[in-house]
């Protein structure tokens, strides 16, 4: 199963780390999410999401509706994240 990249325009892409054994590097995350500081949140026993730690601090933050809906549907808690979001298995990020 590949990780999912939720873009703010509603697009959903499959992505995977260059090294499946090592998982995503920080540089891969910075490039995909387009941010300078990555936030890592475990939201289920199998999945985590990675997003822009400073997403709400940027001018005109864009809420990621699809990512928020998915994360909320899995964990039951309301989430509100901005910017591009990666959802992956916990072992894909080390």
Image: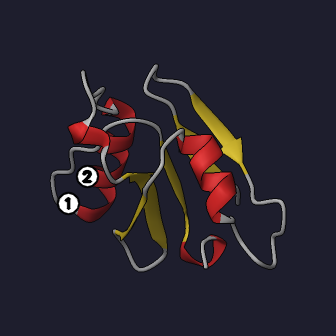
Q: For label 2, count other residues whose C-alpha is less than 10 Å away and answer few (under 14), some (14-19) or many (20+).
A: some
Q: Is residue 52 depicted above or below 82 in this figure?
A: below
Quarter of the image with the N terminus in it: bottom right
Look at the numbered disc 1 and give the secondary structure of its residue: loop
When the figure is inspected, residue 8 is found, relative to residue 3, above or below; the finding is above
- Which residue corresponds to mark 2? 72
Residue under the point 36% across and 46% down: 70
Give the vertical position of 14 relative to 2 (above or below): above
Question: Dividing the picture into quarters, in which one does residue 19 lie?
Answer: bottom right
Residue 72 located left or right of residue 16 = left
Question: Separation of disc 2 and disc 1 at Cα?
Answer: 5 Å
Tag 1: Cα neighbours inside 10 Å, few (<14), some, or many (≥20)?
Answer: few
Residue 58 higher or lower than 67, as above or below: above
Query: Image quadrant for the C terminus?
Result: bottom right
62 to the left or right of 93: left
Quadrant in the rendering for residue 12: top right
Horizontal and vertical percent position of residue 64: 34, 33
- In which quadrant of the rendered view does residue 62 lie? top left
Q: Position of residue 75 (x, y in %)?
A: 27, 64
* Disc sitting over residue 76 in the figure: 1
Residue 38 versus residue 3: which sits nearer the camera? 38
What residue is at 71 percent from the left and 47 percent from the top?
Answer: 15
Is 92 in front, or is 33? 33
Q: Residue at x 38, y 41 (%)?
A: 67
Residue positioned 16% across, 59% down in the render? 77
Q: Secondary structure at mark 2?
A: helix
Dots 2, 1 in contact, CB < 8 A: yes
| Whole-percent x, y for residue 73 in the image | 29, 52
């Amino acid at each position: 199963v590949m990780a999912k990249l939720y873009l703010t325009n509603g697009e959903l892409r499959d992505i995977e780390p260059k090294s499946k054994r090592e998982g995503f590097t920080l540089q891969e995350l910075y490039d995909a999410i387009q941010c300078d500081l990555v936030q890592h949140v475990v939201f289920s026993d199998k999945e985590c999401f990675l997003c822009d730690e400073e997403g709400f601090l940027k001018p005109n933050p864009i809420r990621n509706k699809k990512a928020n809906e998915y994360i909320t549907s899995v964990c039951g808690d309301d989430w509100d994240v901005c910017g591009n979001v990666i959802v992956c298995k916990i072992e894909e990020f080390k």
